[in-house]
Image (tube, grey):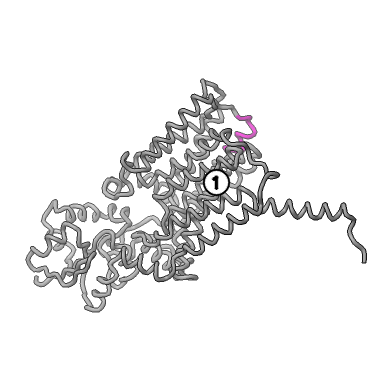
Amino acid sequence: MNSLPSASIGEYQSSHSNIFRRIFSFPLMLASLLTMLGTLTVRARFNDPDMWWQLKTGQIIWTTHTIPTNDLFSYTTNHQPLIPHEWLSQVLIYSAYHWGGYTGLMLWLYFFTSALVVVGYILCALYSGNPKTAFAGALIIWFFSTTVLAIRPQIVGYLLLTIELLLVHLGSTRSPRWFFALPPLFALWVNCHGSFMFGLLVLGILLLCSFFDLQAGSLVSSRWDFSRQKILILTILLSTAALFLNPIGLKQVLYPVNTLFHQPIGLSQIEEWQPLRMGDPRGFVLFGILVCIFLLLVTRRSKLYLNELLLLIAGTVFAISHLRMTILFGIFAAPLFSRLISTSWDEYDAKRDHPLANLSLVLVAALITILSFPNRQDITKQIDTGNPVKAVQFIKDSQLSGHMLNAYDYGGYLIWALPEHPDFIDGRADVYEWAGVLEEVRRWATLEEDPNILLSKYNVDFCLLERRSAIANVLPLMRNWKLVYSDDASQVFVRSGP
């Protein structure tokens, strides 16, 4: 039998050792730890008030092969026209439910959470040139993403924003051909979530800075050559054109602008649209990161590129203005922070890797991720805790009929669990603001006017309210209203007379 020469055996063993070392590398181990962290963060976040109507909309699109452009769920909006700006994400959400039920939805959340933090890590690693310090950048993205980690389209949108920054970095530093991946990205993005507008902001800032050649202290900018500028301009034009590949056209492209400037009630009343309070831990961390960036620039005389500064300012402004947009600060600040601290830790050297140790940590992270996955009982408990499950069952058993008035946070679940009763209001604040219902409900819930005005206008026959709400304490004192059901969270009142 012929045998390999000893030199060939050594080369063969060395080749396999290098493959093993590359597969189970230190960066892979860090990525697995980030995946574990992300999944542990969302394991108790199955229930979200808006998830339910997103799920129901996805089901309608899936089964009818049509995208709704008018409200189908509420009797108060009079079939108000709507903009289906998240229809593709809704289909993705329902597809997870269709194939795996509640477990499938939880896997959906696990996947997109992991993808967001891991892609963020890759972005920071390439941007800083140091996979070690990139871990700190990924942690920043994870921390500020906690405002959007839920089974909702927004997590898809911010994943696409992170991918865009990755493509922009590759196109700026390697080959401008990477820019040509942007138009397909925007064609997908516009049908998933309105955050595509921030993607246009990124491209606009990049194009603007490409015309400047300056150095003012630490602030620098290098003018691009015309050929690279031409490719960027072309891809921006193509990306803008790609936005019109949607069911509505211009209205869908302008929807984010409508949200920020033409929905004042929703922005002022809904908690996630409120300004970031400095007492919030995210406020302290945001301020701390800005101070660290300033100190690093001053003490190390590091460069700050003009596009980095503009993105940092934009991210800070959006984060301070709206709690749900703190993730923008995380995504924009993380690559810069990773680059500024990249010299604080020696660069990664694959030759000094310890693949067995890395493999052990990867396996531990995978085991923790698997063991922490909530079972059906855990998910059911989350649903029962966050929704009027028992009250809905009472309504069904009692065969209550007529118009229902429900608490705002209950509306989404009612669309899914009680479709035979069109709801009064739910988390689609845009639709209800356009129809004038949101302001009426605000005055009713805060007792700014006689509650009978709203009840009479919509001929309400029964109410499903949160027990802790102010109006739930008032309704029993009103004539012709009777409490027929109560539990720790919900109450049902029925009209007892004309």
- Residue 426 position, x and y percent, is 29, 60
- Asked whether residue 128 appears in the rendered view, the answer is yes
Residue 227 lies in the magenta stretch: yes
Question: Residue visible at 43% across and 38% down?
Answer: 315
Report the residue that reaches farthest toward the right: 1
Q: Nearer the viewer, residue 372 or 68?
A: 372
The magenta-colored residue range is 224-233
Decide if residue 65 is in sight here: no
Residue 439 among magenta residues: no
Q: Residue at the spot x=56%, y=54% of the render?
A: 32
Q: Nearer the viewer, residue 197 or 19?
A: 19
Give the secondary structure at mark 1: helix
Three-letter residue code for mark 1: Tyr
Left or right of residue 75, residue 83 in this image? right
Q: How many numbered discs?
A: 1
Q: Report the front residue among 459 and 133.
A: 133
Q: Nearer the viewer, residue 76 or 144?
A: 144
Query: Circle 1: is it few (<14), some (14-19), or many (20+) Cα within 10 Å?
Result: many
Tell me: 360 left or right of 449.
Answer: right
Indicate the quadrant where residue 261 lies. Answer: top left
Give residue 311's position: percent from left, percent from top.
47, 36
Quarter of the image where one finds residue 384: bottom left
The N terminus lies in which quarter of the figure? bottom right
Q: Position of residue 176 (x, y in %)?
A: 64, 39
**For mark 1, what is the residue?**
121
Outermost top residue: 216
Name the dominant secondary structure of the magenta segment: helix
> In the figure, 227 relative to 164: above or below?
above
The image quarter in which residue 126 lies: top right
